[in-house]
Amino acid sequence: MARAARKAAAAAPLSPPPTFSSPSSAGPLTRARRLLARGAEASLSWTPRELARGCVLASWVKAHGFHDARRAFDGTPATSLPQWTAIISGCARGGRHAEGLRAFAEMLGGGGGGGTTAAPNAFVLAGVLRCCAGLGDVESGRRVHGWMLRAGVRQDVVLCNALLDMYAKCGHHGRARRAFGAMFDKDAVSWNIVVSACLQGGDVPGAVRLFDESPLQDTSSWNTIISGLMRNGCASEALGRLQRMVRAGVVFNHYTYSTAFALAGMLSLLDLGRQLHGRVVMAALEDDAFVCCSLMDMYCKCGEMEAALSIFDRWSRFTGDVKFAWSTMVAGYVQNGREEEALEFFCRMLREGVPAEQFILTSVAAACGNAGMVEQGRQVHGFVEKLGHKFDAPLASAMVDMYSKCGSLEDACRIFDSAPVKNVALWTTMLCSYASYGQGSMAIEIFDRMKVEKITPNEITLVAVLSACSHSGLVSEGDHYFNLMQEEYGIVPSTEHYNCMVDLYGRAGLLDKAKNFIEENNISHEAIVWKTLLSACRLHKNIEYAELASEKLIQLEQCDSGSYVLMSNMYATNSKWLDTFKLRSSMREREVRKQPGQSWIHLKNVVHTFVAGDMLHPRSADIYACLEKLMGRLKEMGYTSRIDIVVHDVEEEQREASLKFHSEKLAIAFGIISTPAGTPLRIFKNLRVCEDCHEAIKFMSRATNRDIVVRDMYRFHHFKDGSCSCEDFW
């Protein structure tokens, strides 16, 4: 090792780590150091009998663990170095890292028969370093490194690689780089470890530089740099490296194909995925489980579910172990918005006797949440408990999100509170749930609890906090958290954070401040912020700023149907019918189509969908009769129609009639005639709920004595006893 490294290590005090302490010995590390200093680490003369015992011991350790192996050999205590080497190396290979360190402590303390100590050699030290890496115990690893430097242990490439790997896996990437620089001999594994360490530490330029300097670029090296670039968000650069790998003629292995499929899926490069698929067939790797699941996942991410299903059906005929394949398909259906098919596929899986693991239940819960299927979601919840699965953080997050999206915030809170382990994703999911229900104060309380629990928020957490402030009118709080995310957490604001702030000011009526914020932060090129400002202008009836936002969107060529409709509705609300006509003509010329409003309700595992004035439902006559009677009751209670929001130049009676039969009102009427009195109703809508429906549903909740939860494209509205959870601020 380098002289500077030896000097630094010699200057550091050596106190025995608790992990290595042995109750039956005093100062075993000091004795080991003396033995090493005398050169006792050199290879000893091992008899055939000792070697045989070592081999048998290694097998026992791997299968049964250290203590069982020792009990099995009570008559032949492990006093020789081959036996200790077998035990410690076996523990390292078998993942019994804590037992490996305990064995090392016993070895140093003379724990074998006769109470004599054995000097650790390079094989033992490499095994101990692997145990330290497995436990993340960098302090013990540093002490081992110190012994190596003091005693002058001959550090071959295998031992040095174990040292590099220990520092890298413990997160000390700088130490790994320094140890790598001090190595005299380096093999491909050495280069791979240090490149991977740079990538794990976020030093992408350093990793690329080291990779390019490496004289030993084998398949594993290319796999390391490509997958590392992907993990660090450098997908385009990873694609360039993959192309260079092909030009260099490097042979792909199963991990290369798996990584390449993941890259094609990440970038939605279907043509690349198909080319890779052809290469897999030629390489006869189509039946490899690792490759096949990656291939299916690629097709799922590219929206080609039929191709993914074809591969699944072919593969499942030849192998029985397809749990990951089932999970990939269910997740693929969810990613592509085909939740009902995801649930059907899950039911098929159960019928075929495939056990439901936690990771697939996470996807199924997501499907239920996205589709708003609360009853199916409850069945999944019951299924989890019946199988005895623990609510780890990913599964708990999925269940919290499911209940929240299905309009049952109370159940979401119960799952969150009962989760034994809460990571940042689970905290963020709960925070997002409160934000979507307009409960800004509760969202802020969750954020404060996160800080007390020493959970560091991420970018998504701050988006949720700012959104919660926006939907609750908490302007000063929003300003505080926007500054906090930069000053305390070092999070650079993204478009989502900026848009939340524009929304915060816009909803609160601070349109001047919203416009100035856009200009001051140089985000005028982002269409989303102008759409948000346009929506706020509609809310506060400010046609001047609305026209400005609309002009900006047209300049950016981002004026989609929603933006056109917002502007058209503003003109109509202000009786500017000529401007309304011109804007709608422009929509026709540009072939911009308005998304039709739809509402739906789930009853007895059936989805009932409605559009405004819908007469296609089998029970239309009953629905309209119920709605006519209910609207009459609402008027007696004080409800008046918001005819000012009707966007057509028609008579007042026609305006009122058009409002009466909006899709959400039809869905609620169907729910009323189809469920027992007092049953909560959950309605889903693909657009923003209008002001008239919002007002009418408040009266409906009081008239029918029902809780009515409406989930529109932006948030939840929980109507109860004549009021809404949003407090009329949405």
Image: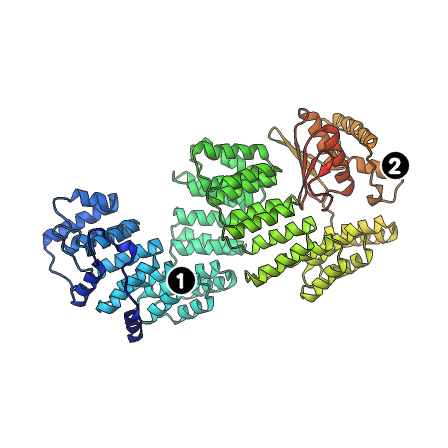
Task: Give how far apart the Cα atoms at labels 1 and 2 are.
Answer: 71 Å
Which quadrant of the view contains residue 206?
Answer: bottom left
Measuring from the top left, give residue 154's x and y in whole percent.
Answer: 22, 67
Q: Is residue 536 above or below residue 666?
A: below
**The one of 701 and 199 positioned closer to us in this rendering:** 701
At mark 2, the secondary structure is helix
At mark 1, the secondary structure is helix
| Image disc number at residue 196 | 1
Measuring from the top left, give residue 494's x and y in whole percent.
Answer: 61, 60
Residue farthest to the bottom?
3
Counting labels gives 2
Measuring from the top left, give residue 80's x and y in whole percent.
Answer: 14, 54
Residue shown at 70%/62% (left/top)?
A: 517
Q: Is residue 219 above or below residue 712?
A: below
> Which class describes the residues within 10 Å of circle 1: few (<14), some (14-19), or many (20+)?
many
Q: Which residue is mark 2?
A: 653
Answer yes or no: is residue 296 visible: yes
